[in-house]
Amino acid sequence: MKHIYNPPADAGKPTFLLLHGTGGTETDLLPAAGHIDPEAGVLSVRGNVSENGMPRFFKRLSEGVFDMEDLRERTEELHAFIGQAADEYGFDRNNVIALGYSNGANIAANLLFTYEDSLKAAILHHPMVPDRHKELPNLDGTRVFIAAGTNDPICPKEESEDLERLLSGAGAKVDLHWENKGHQLTMDELVAAKAWYEKG
C-alpha cells in the first residue's frame, strides 16, 4: 500500500496509523498527527480503492451504504499491511493508534470490530458503524475517541451513538465528543483528541 513512514522519537512512543477520508491522500492527516503528538511515529496509508479517481479504503454501493465484502477484504489487507510495516520498519506492532477521518475512520473502526489486538487505541473523526451484524472481539482496555457532528449530513448522530454503544459493549473505553460543524474535521476536534490522548 502506498504510504509514508516516519519513525517515533523514541521506542516508547506510539505509531499513528493515519487513514484519510474519501478523496484524500497519505499527506492529509500528517498535520493532525503532529498536533496530537509530534514525537509519535507515523504510518500514513493511501486507500487502495478508487471511486471516480478519489482514493478510498473500501468500496461503497452508495452514500452511507458499504460494500461489505470489499470492506472485509480491505480490512484484512490493512491489518496484514500494518504487521508487514512493523517488521520492515521496526516499530512496536502493539503500540499502534489509528487516527482516521470519515472513510478512514470507518475502516479503523472495522479493524476494532474484527481483531482483538489490531490497535492499541483509535481516534475516529466522523465514523459510522462499519458492520451492524458482526460479533465484536474482546476490546477490554482499548481506548477509543470518537469525534462527531450533531448536524453531520453524512454521518447521522445515531451512527456515532450506536458505535459508542457497540464498542463499549465489547469492553472498549470510549469517549464521544460532539461538535456542531457538520462533517468537517475541525481544529476543535483535534484539540479535544489531543487532550484525550494526553490523559493516557
Image (cartoon, rainbow, N blue to C red):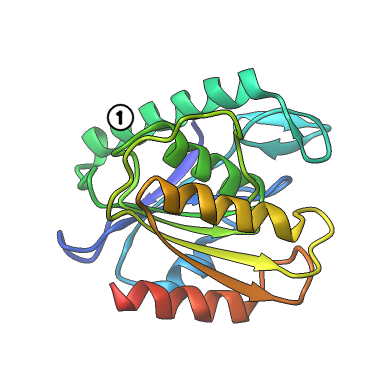
> Farthest residue in the left direction?
11
Front residue of 129/99: it is 129
At x 64%, y 74%, the residue is: 178
Pointer 1: what residue? 84
The crowding category of the residue bearing disc 1, from other C-alpha atoms within 10 Å (few below 14, some 14 to 19, many at least 20), is few
Front residue of 72/4: it is 72
At x 47%, y 41%, the residue is: 3
Residue 9 position, x and y percent, is: 23, 66
At x 75%, y 77%, the residue is: 180
Residue 117 position, x and y percent, is: 28, 39
Question: In the image, is 136 to the left or to the right of 51?
Answer: left
Q: Quadrant of residue 155?
A: bottom right
Front residue of 154/27: it is 154
Compared with 107, 167 (above or below) is below
Compared with 61, 33 (above or below) is below
Question: In the image, is 35 to the left or to the right of 13?
Answer: right
Question: In the image, is 40 to the left or to the right of 113?
Answer: left
Compared with 19, 149 (above or below) is below
SS assignment at label 1? helix
Residue 96 position, x and y percent, is: 31, 50
Q: Amino acid at mark 1?
A: Gln
The mark total stands at: 1
Compared with 29, 26 (above or below) is above
Residue 183 position, x and y percent, is: 76, 63
At x 30%, y 70%, the residue is: 39
Which quadrant would the C terminus be assigned to in this image? bottom left
